[in-house]
Amino acid sequence: MAFANVNLSRRQRRALSFYDDSIANTARLSYPPVSVSDLLNFSSNVEHNQLQTGILLYKILPVRLATRIIDIHDLPYICGINPFMQFIHNDYVNVFMQMKAIKHIKTQADLSKFNTLMIEGLKQGNSALPQLARASKELAPHLAPEVLNRFINRFITCRIGRRLLAEQHLAIIQQHLHPQPHSHLIGVIDHDVNIRAVIKATYKRAFLISRDVNGLSPHMDLNIEQTTALPYVVRHIQYILLEIFKNAIRATAERAIRDSTRFLDEDDIPQVQVTVHGGPSETTIIVSDKGGGISQDHQDRVFDFAFSTAQGLDAASLLEQPQGVGDYANRPMAGEGFGLPMARAYARFFGGDISFQTMQDHGTDVYIKLRHVDLKGTQNILPV
Ligand code: ADP
Ligand code: K
Ligand code: MG
């Protein structure tokens, strides 16, 4: 690979080529597929099985990291030398090297070392999303949208998978050490998500971001028709909702500001309607706004990574250190063009989807379909 190994000493270059080989060889290995039932099984007989789970992750994660690193190498040269892409690349190589430095997992001490590495990796990975958003903005002019979408989609879907595996493994150990009575959680999977609470808290977050940026926000009108429990990873729902709410709020607020000739009161702006229909295996959340809709020529592009109609997002706010947990952190109001496609990648991870209907000069309905995490643990293979 020709990966910016300019200005390196001979020793550094030798080290680099050693890892190049190691990465390429590892990427060629096959690894066992992971299913939802595997995720749930992490929680059985933890005392004994945590070592087995550790060994499984020790097999899977380096292969997946190596495959993504090779994906970066396979991009056109101009993309590989982009500083944001390089930052992500170097991060991946670092974590890969650290994992490889653990020779095997045989004892509890090996496992502890590996777990610490995963905790560090998760923390470090928090900043990867803004970097990736920035990278995709800068790569967009050089790549066909299909190529960029395919690359980023695979990158983030695998990232969601890797993080979920690590988080599940670590959370189960925590829950084993500090059991919480009446907990709804199996690792990071909540078998009965309190969707009302999640929607309210997430809406408030989007509402406040918009107040900051636009000076005002529409209120929400929430209507829940739900008869069954919703088993899901709460953090995933939070991420999806935050992005969809920000879009609806932005469209509504900007339209209100555009159309008004007098001082605006938040109570006068059309509310964002949120409706939840819970079915036996799927929950649909419909987010309806009266923000004027999406124009005909943009409708095919809104799910493209880096496509945005928001202007003037400065580099500093794109790279702001996230302050929330994981991907659900301080994300900018709009401008990255990452919201819709990333939210859809999250929804599709467990077999759901995101789609929309838009009415010109009126508004947009976004349908978020969440396929329930199958607690009976059928062998649904996860895209990790
Ligand atoms: P960003 O919000 O950073 O622009 P997104 O991927 O979330 O990126 O959205 C892409 C574009 O889709 C937005 O810039 C906007 O033009 C359009 N869009 C998304 N949701 C709505 C909506 N509810 N009403 C009007 N336009 C929308
Ligand atoms: K977009
Ligand atoms: Mg958005």
Image: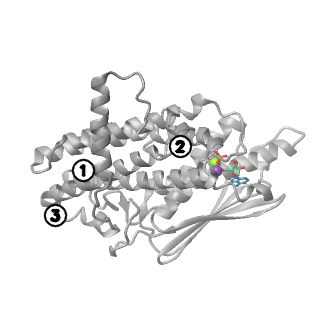
Q: Residues within 10 Å of mark 3 (few under 14, many from 20)?
A: few
Q: Residue at x 71, y 59 (%)?
A: 300
Colour style of the rendered protein structure: one colour
Residue 112: x and y in percent read 17, 44
Label 1 vs 3, first from the N-terminus: 3
Image-quadrant location for residue 340: bottom right
Q: Which residue is mark 3?
A: 45
Mark 1 sits near ligand 3, with its Cβ under 8 Å away: no
Q: Position of residue 312 (x, y in %)?
A: 70, 33
Tell which tag, 3 or 2, sits nearer the viewer. 2
Q: Is residue 119 visible?
A: no
Disc 1 to disc 2, how far (Cα)? Answer: 43 Å
- How far, Cα to Cα, is label 3 from label 2? 47 Å
**Circle 2 is placed at which residue position?**
76
Q: Quadrant of residue 45?
A: bottom left
Q: Is residue 132 left or right of residue 271?
A: left
Label 1: how many Cα within 10 Å (few below 14, some 14–19, many 20+): few
Q: Residue at x 42, y 63 (%)?
A: 232
The residue that disc 1 covers is: 174
Q: Residue at x 51, y 41 (%)?
A: 132
Look at label 2 and name its amino acid: Pro
Q: Residue furthest bottom?
A: 280
